[in-house]
Image (tube, grey):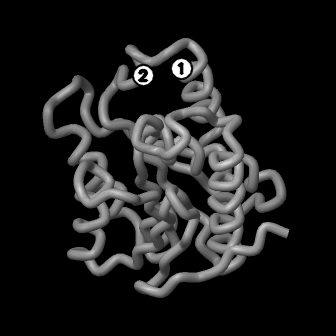
Amino acid sequence: MTDKNMACAFTGHRPQYLPWRGGEDDPRCLEFKQITEKRIQKFINDGVTYFLSGMALGFDIYAAEAVIKLKRDNPGAALECVIPFDGQESRWSESDKARYYSILGRCNKKTVICRDYAKSCYAERNRYLVDNSGFLFAALSKSEGGTAYTVGYAVKKNRRVIKINPETNEIIENDEPIQINLF
């Protein structure tokens, strides 16, 4: 892996907690993905070229797909897929599994935290994401759950946290809102 200070991890809500409830053709989702991609491109422009995705449905997958897309024009960019346990996708739909496997087939590194499911494997995955990065890009609109835990852990570890609110698409860096221009 590269210098963790030049690495960014992703964490965010699952589809059922996003405003469009998994409907990715919803204009709100399309705009959210576009803003996410633009922010990842800004990371790359600023020299942050190593990205870690926890590979959960929702924001983790969106961000991983954005990195893969951006790697075409930014060959120095790399993606590590951090999987909480072997078989995490086993109960997913066939289309979600295909998407997951497509990302795994195009990532630079695959890390599996636990061989088998354990109650702690998601928290261990989240700590790995933070411990191996200098930045955390989080899609966060509620103050409980795994994403909120991961953001809290990142703050405790003095990582730079950049949040995007999926309800408003507002990006907050260093507790200050910033604008991402889509055009």
Q: On the image, numbered disc 1 is attached to which residue?
A: 97
**Horizontally, is 151 left or right of 7 in the view?**
left
**Residue 6 can be seen in this image:** yes
Secondary structure at numbered mark 2: loop
Given residues 126 and 183, the one toward you in this image is: 183
Residue in the picture at 68% in, 58% down: 37
Task: Using a 10 Å C-alpha cutoff, classify the residue at mark 2 as few (fewer than 14 neighbours), some (14 to 19) or many (20 or more).
Answer: some
Q: Quadrant of residue 158?
A: bottom left
Position of 73 relative to 113 (above/below): below
**Horizontally, is 171 left or right of 55 in the view?**
right
Q: Are marks 2 and 1 in contact (CB under 8 Å)?
A: yes
Task: Using a 10 Å C-alpha cutoff, classify the residue at mark 1 as few (fewer than 14 neighbours), some (14 to 19) or many (20 or more).
Answer: some
**Residue 183, position as x, y percentages in the image:** 85, 69
Residue in the picture at 62% in, 72% down: 43
Q: Quadrant of residue 127?
A: bottom left
Q: CA distance from mark 2 to mark 1?
A: 6 Å
Identify the mark at residue 106; answer none if there is no mark: none
Q: On the image, numbered disc 2 is attached to which residue?
A: 89
**Residue 68 can be seen in this image:** no
Given residues 177 and 124, the one toward you in this image is: 177
Residue in the picture at 64% in, 36% down: 24
Q: Quadrant of residue 11?
A: bottom left
**Residue 38, position as x, y percentages in the image:** 71, 65
Mark with earlier residue (2, 1):
2
**Residue 111, position as x, y percentages in the image:** 40, 41
The amino acid marked with disc number 1 is: Lys
**Residue 51, position as x, y percentages in the image:** 54, 58
Residue in the picture at 55% in, 70% down: 170
**Horizontally, is 36 left or right of 173 in the view?**
right
Given residues 50 and 88, the one toward you in this image is: 88
Tell me how many marks there are: 2
